[in-house]
Amino acid sequence: MNPMINASQRSNSNQSLTAHTFSTSPTLLEISTSKKVTRQSLGYEAKLGSLYNIRKDQFCGNEQIFFDLSLRRHVSTINKSQTRFNIDCNDTYVRKLCNLNIEAPLILSILCGWSNATKEFETYLTNVKEDNRTVKATIICRTELKYERLNITPRTLVEYISTNAFDNPEATHVVTEIQWGANILAVFERKLNKQENQEEIEENLKTSLLRKLDNFEAKIIHEDLFSITYYGNIGIVLPKDQLPRTVSDTIRLFKIISQCPQYIDEEKAKPIAYRLFPLKELAILINSKSDIKNKLTIKDSTGEISCQCQLEIQRLFDEHLLVEQELLSIQHMIDHFPAYDFDSISKRIDDITSGLIKFQTEMRDTCEKVRNSLINEIQIERILRRYERGVCSFSGLELFINENKTVLKRLHLLRNIEEKGIQSLASKNFLEDILHEYRGDDIYTLYVSIEQLLKDCPVSKEQYQYFLELMEEPDETKPRRFFLVDYDIQRDLTKIPLPPTIHFYCNATLITNDYFMHRQDIPADIDEVTAFTQDLSSNHIPPLIVYIRQLEKMSVVFVDLKATIHDLINQICNEYELNSTEFYLTLNDIPLDNSETIESTNIHAETNIELRMKSGSETK
């Protein structure tokens, strides 16, 4: 299926548009002050007569070459309504530029830091994934409405032109044609969990978007999980607070735009591309037909950068982008690294940032000299060779990882922990925060050294594995929260290493600080229940609530345990100075005859015995 969908409505005019077609093929690399060129607007709003510097691909401020507003009577307008869509799942910098139909020389200018792009477009171009486990797709909607063309003749030029514009050494071209319309971009993005197949999700997203735009039914996997960000000229379509918030609604809006070009009327339309006429040619026309004493001249320069050289520049910029993306994923977790890793990561991120700025500056200065025919492109190639082995390159990243292998291992483990639904706590006030936020929930907190986990310490691995098994146990009695505290970054917890342990909190009250050990004391089957309850001792007091949680899950419940549970509650209250009236039992469907038993396939699901603690206090 062709990803480019053409939804055009052409005017009935028989006038040929050939002379006004805006070429968007990024093939011409020659920078010449004596040739007509096309440049995409990237949101910048210029006017007919605006001056342009082709050597830097920038407008010369608000300077105009025409001084008489009545020039409008020499402007012809051609209506041409057309909407095109493009779908892209590639998040590279250069691919984004190509998706916006940006010409090859302008791509190089943008990479080097020359750009009149508005903030909306700059944000889109520089936005990168924060994680490799992120699926991202972009729909580019390009709507063209009309062309404006200034009819250039020597007679009209002499009447309206300001010869002072030729005194500007930066100016090389002037805007003589404008293409009006809108560039609207919608970016769909979501982070995947470990169980999801990234390739499958990406393919489903792209295929579904294509089918939906082509008026076919399609189902996007977990559509509700995608975030949507809009860029470009979206503001001329709808106010920000009225924009669609689902993928399907966004596609529906784009289809309305394509089927009803008047949805974006002429008053709302923005310049999306410019046709630039060389000032040198303009000077020749004026000199031939005017009586001015001083003939107009303009310095000509033709600097060529080969296609191969430009591709190398683009490749290196994209490589820098991917390196930055990888370090961003590390930076996202930087609070979960110990101090010795934190410092090395922070320094490397600073080196990457400063290195990219230095590379961009050096490349910009060199390209400008090439475009002014002052040097040849060999100087560019030397810069490329030097930087492709620097800190911003893949080789530099590999060297950093090889020197800091524990950083990568810790990063992978942290991601794995996060994907399993365990929140790793970095804040020093973590305990107070989570007890306040999840006061009514059961809270399980694993205290462990990640460094010891990475070293396969048996005790740490045993506690971690048990913690994961605990997460997988079904429990519908109360919401459960799972957290991990890394001894390596919580140095204020203790001055000496502590063994791994699991703390269990119920209603913001610490029930046990060693859930793993106390759980071993709980009866595994119904035959042990009576013996356990008849032999209560001080060693059994901490896991009492854990024990009652187990009673709720048993498939057989003895009626005579009702009194026993009441006794347990009283002991808990006495031991922990809790108010027994804050406890209550809901006993449903339990016969009064003590000789009977209740058999159920799932007492836990039916909640035959449900113990709830409405409130509690801190432990004694």
Image (cartoon, helix red, strand yellow):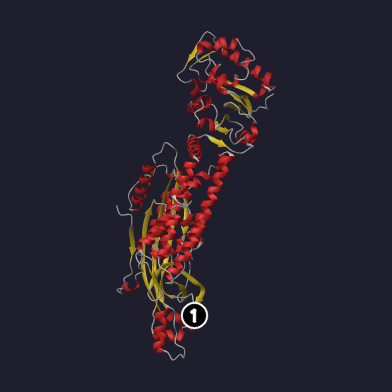
Residue shown at 56%/33% (left/top)?
483
Relative placement, left or right, of 543 versus 128 is: right
Percent of width and height locating residue 398: 45, 45
Which quarter shows the C terminus? top right
Percent across and percent down for residue 520 are 54, 18
The answer to whether residue 239 is seen in the rendering is no
Observer able to see residue 484: yes
Q: Is mark 1 on a helix, strand or loop?
A: helix
The x, y position of residue 404, in whole percent, is 50, 41
Q: Can you say whether 410 is above or below 578 in the image?
A: below
- The residue where tag 1 is placed is 165
The amino acid marked with disc number 1 is: Ala
Tell me if mark 1 has few (under 14), some (14-19) or many (20+) residues whose alpha carbon lies within 10 angstroms of its own: some
Q: How many marks?
A: 1
200 on left or right of 615 = left
Q: Nearer the viewer, residue 416 or 215?
A: 416
Residue 144: quarter of image: bottom left
* Residue located at (60% from left, 31% from top): 440
Q: Which of 10 and 359 is in front in this view?
A: 359
Left or right placement of residue 162 versus residue 306 in this view: right
- Extreme residue in the top direction: 595
Residue 448, quarter of picture: top right
In percent of width and height, residue 484 lies at: 56, 33
